[in-house]
Image (cartoon, rainbow, N blue to C red):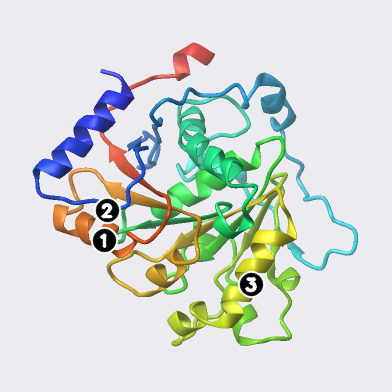
Amino acid sequence: MNIIELASIRLQQLVQTGVEIPGMAEDLLVLKRGGQAGAEAVEGQSHGQQDEVADSDMRTARNSAFPSRPAVSSGATSAAITLDLQHLEDSGVLASIRSRSTMAEEFRHIKRPLLSNIRAGASDPTQRRSLVMVTSALPGEGKTFCSINLAMSMAIEVDTSVLLVDADVIRANLLQTLGIEPRKGLLDVLTTPSTDLSQVLLRTNVPNLSILPAGTRNLRSTELLASSAMDALMVELASRYPDRIIIFDTTPLLLTSEAKVLASRMGQVVVVVEEAKTPASAISQAFSAIEHCPIVLPVLNKRKQSIHDYGSYYD
């Protein structure tokens, strides 16, 4: 059984249990559980799409060894950080992007429909398809893991740059997961007009990847994300660099109001659903909360059985 057939069966099972998923795109992304330290490997493919040759051997070679220090842009004021890629891979946080691996290849399948949607909407900036939100119905379903690995995988594209935003302003686990100390970020830009975006962006030793921390916690975070200042920031993020993709790791949809506020500003929303754990009622409520969003891509996460094994092919 191929992955498209499996995805179709999963959708049918949800429908049979009474789950209505309004606004869902036809694509279904399916993830499975990885082997190291409880890591979640990813597997997915969309209808009518083949894995493109975009991730060619030439690109793999180009990104096979990252510099120990990030390059410094002329006149840039953003801070520079070095991600310990080997440690992140060993701990199961990160799929290897310096060599061919099963997990890395599966994320190539995951990013393909997202990139296709971005390119299809390039002629109409108002669609904001380069703004991609990653969320879930409940905590612990793997949204931060998916956000990190999608950002890493997209950063190796030839003609794109990626900004990974920690928009989970309640828990803000993204920096901790990557081994980075907390610092100013998104909420500080919104609360302090004198704080320029360039002052809080973090350049990394991964080419074409930057990070925007969540920043200082604020009890009015929902109101800040719904403010005109946030509107202006989103326009700046989407328009400053035409080749930039912005991935937002947000709060769960059913526990806070922040994710719903952000969803209204996004061009694409990825909803991570943990297999055999997330209640059907929670899935239905989560998708109902974002039914106004133009593109919604569901991700079935933490599959316990692999469908493909790419590892032996590349050995």
The amino acid on which the numbered mark 3 sits, given as a three-letter code, is Leu
Residue 90 in the image: state x and y as whole percent.
Answer: 50, 39
Mark 3, secondary structure of its residue: helix
Q: Which mark is residue 57?
A: none
Query: Residue at left 38%, top 29%?
Result: 47
Q: Closer to the N terminus: mark 2 or mark 1? A: 2
Q: Is residue 222 left or right of residue 206?
A: left
Residue 84 in the image: state x and y as whole percent.
Answer: 62, 48
| Mark 2 Cα shell of 10 Å, populated few (<14), some (14-19), many (≥20) | some
Mark 1, secondary structure of its residue: helix
Labels 3 and 1 touching (C-beta < 8 A): no
Report which residue position mark 3 lands on. 233
Q: Is residue 300 above or below residue 165?
A: above
Q: Is residue 71 left or right of residue 97?
A: right
| Mark 1 Cα shell of 10 Å, populated few (<14), some (14-19), many (≥20) | some
Labels 2 and 1 touching (C-beta < 8 A): yes
Q: Which residue is at the far right?
A: 74
Report which residue position mark 1 lands on. 288
**C-alpha span from label 3 to label 2:** 29 Å
Query: Residue at left 51%, top 24%?
Result: 51
Q: Closer to the N terminus: mark 3 or mark 2? A: 2
The amino acid on which the numbered mark 2 sits, given as a three-letter code, is Pro
Q: Which residue is at the far front?
A: 124
Query: Residue at left 47%, top 46%?
Result: 93
Labels 3 and 2 touching (C-beta < 8 A): no
**C-alpha span from label 2 to label 1:** 6 Å
The amino acid on which the numbered mark 1 sits, given as a three-letter code, is Ser
Report which residue position mark 2 lands on. 22
* Location of residue 1 (image quadrant): top left
Residue 278 in the image: state x and y as whole percent.
Answer: 20, 52
**C-alpha span from label 3 to label 1:** 27 Å
Could you tell me if residue 166 is visible in this image? Answer: yes
